[in-house]
């Protein structure tokens, strides 16, 4: 397949018009259209069709666009891996992470990367559902659970965290510690909204669930933890054994640990096309080594 023809096709798809794509590539619209028509001739089917709203994909075009993006990414990765052989990691590492990860967990990881690889910068963005958005421009995705990104990705479990109930000692002294699931219903409850999960359906270690009506539902883990530290209620959230700065280590205590909770894996996934790039391999190794004590 001719890469120039494929790139022309993908740019038309991304911009929605031949004119915008031609401007982006710095070629004439005639040249661009000729490349797309040549690609359609190779495929033997129409890939695009014109509508009042602009250029849209045919069914065959949908398939080619999906695979074509991966092919272009693999080509770019191959060239990058060749350029980076024998060199220290450099450039930009593009990451997506769950909303609300504790800053006191992320800051040391970022500091470690900068110390080990001063030529490497990080572009980090946060998402309530890291796997539920386009990952075309992502080198590394951090996410909870067993789900995998769609397409050719490699996934590594770097941590297993306990998802359970936490409350402050002050709150439990004031309101009383619940001794059963029934007593739990009379408390202020805060629930983490995990991607694809039901925040009103809480897990038990036996694999069953029960229904609650939380006062707060949010994908922001740190917000729930902050509310719990402030003595406002009992929160269901994933938690690692990492003390909060300026907070006594014994301020938070587990609530009903034998009745509520489960274990969740934390994964780092990388596109298969990028897996052998030295930058990705070294960063992944360092991150996993840093998280091992947790």
Image (spheres, rainbow, N blue to C red):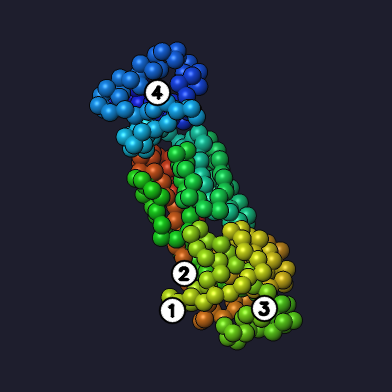
Q: Are marks 2 and 1 in contact (CB under 8 Å)?
A: no
Q: Residues within 10 Å of mark 3 (few under 14, many from 20)?
A: some
Q: Quadrant of residue 1?
A: top left
Residue 70 seen from this side = no
Compute the Cα span from label 3 to label 4: 59 Å
Q: Secondary structure at mark 3?
A: loop
Circles 3 and 1 in contact, beta carbons < 8 Å? no
Q: Which mark is residue 69?
A: none
Helix or strand or loop: what does disc 4 sit on? helix
Q: Which residue is mark 4?
A: 8
Numbered label attached to residue 263: 2
Q: Name the residue tied to disc 1.
A: 206
Q: Nearer the viewer, residue 83 or 195?
A: 195
How many tags in the picture?
Answer: 4
Q: Position of residue 240 (x, y in %)?
A: 55, 65
Label 2 vs label 1: CA separation? 11 Å
- For marks 2 and 4 on the same chain, the one whose residue lies earlier in the sequence: 4
The answer to whether mark 4 and mark 1 are in CB contact below 8 A is no
Give yes or no for contact between labels 2 and 3 (Cβ–Cβ under 8 Å). Answer: no
Front tag of 2 and 1: 1
Name the residue: 66% across, 81% down: 186
Q: Which residue is mark 3?
A: 187
Quick one: label 2, few (<14), some, or many (20+) residues within 10 Å? some
């Amino acid at each position: 397949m001719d890469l120039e023809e494929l790139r022309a096709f993908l740019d038309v798809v991304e911009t929605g018009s031949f004119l915008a794509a031609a401007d982006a590539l710095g070629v004439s619209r005639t040249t661009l259209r000729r490349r797309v028509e040549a690609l359609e001739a190779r495929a033997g089917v129409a890939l695009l069709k014109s509508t009042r709203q602009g250029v849209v994909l045919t069914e065959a075009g949908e398939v080619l666009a999906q695979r074509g993006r991966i092919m272009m990414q693999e080509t770019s990765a191959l060239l990058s891996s060749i350029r980076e052989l024998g060199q220290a990691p450099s450039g930009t590492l593009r990451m997506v992470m769950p909303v609300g990860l504790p800053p006191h967990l992320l800051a040391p990881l970022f500091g470690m990367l900068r110390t080990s690889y001063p030529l490497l910068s990080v572009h980090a963005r946060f998402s309530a559902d890291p796997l539920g958005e386009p990952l075309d421009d992502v080198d590394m995705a951090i996410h909870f659970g067993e789900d995998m990104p769609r397409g050719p990705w490699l996934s590594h479990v770097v941590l297993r965290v306990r998802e359970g109930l936490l409350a402050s000692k002050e709150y439990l002294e004031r309101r009383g510690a619940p001794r059963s699931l029934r007593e739990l219903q009379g408390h202020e409850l805060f629930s983490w909204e995990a991607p694809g999960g039901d925040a009103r359906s809480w897990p038990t270690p036996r694999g069953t669930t029960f229904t609650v009506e939380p006062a707060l539902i949010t994908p922001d883990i740190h917000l729930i933890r902050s509310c719990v530290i402030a003595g406002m209620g009992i929160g269901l959230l994933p938690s690692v054994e990492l003390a909060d700065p300026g907070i006594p280590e014994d301020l938070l205590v587990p609530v009903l640990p034998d009745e509520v909770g489960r274990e969740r894996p934390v994964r780092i996934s990388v596109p298969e096309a990028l897996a052998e790039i030295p930058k990705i391999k070294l960063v992944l190794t360092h991150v996993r080594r840093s998280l091992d004590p947790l």
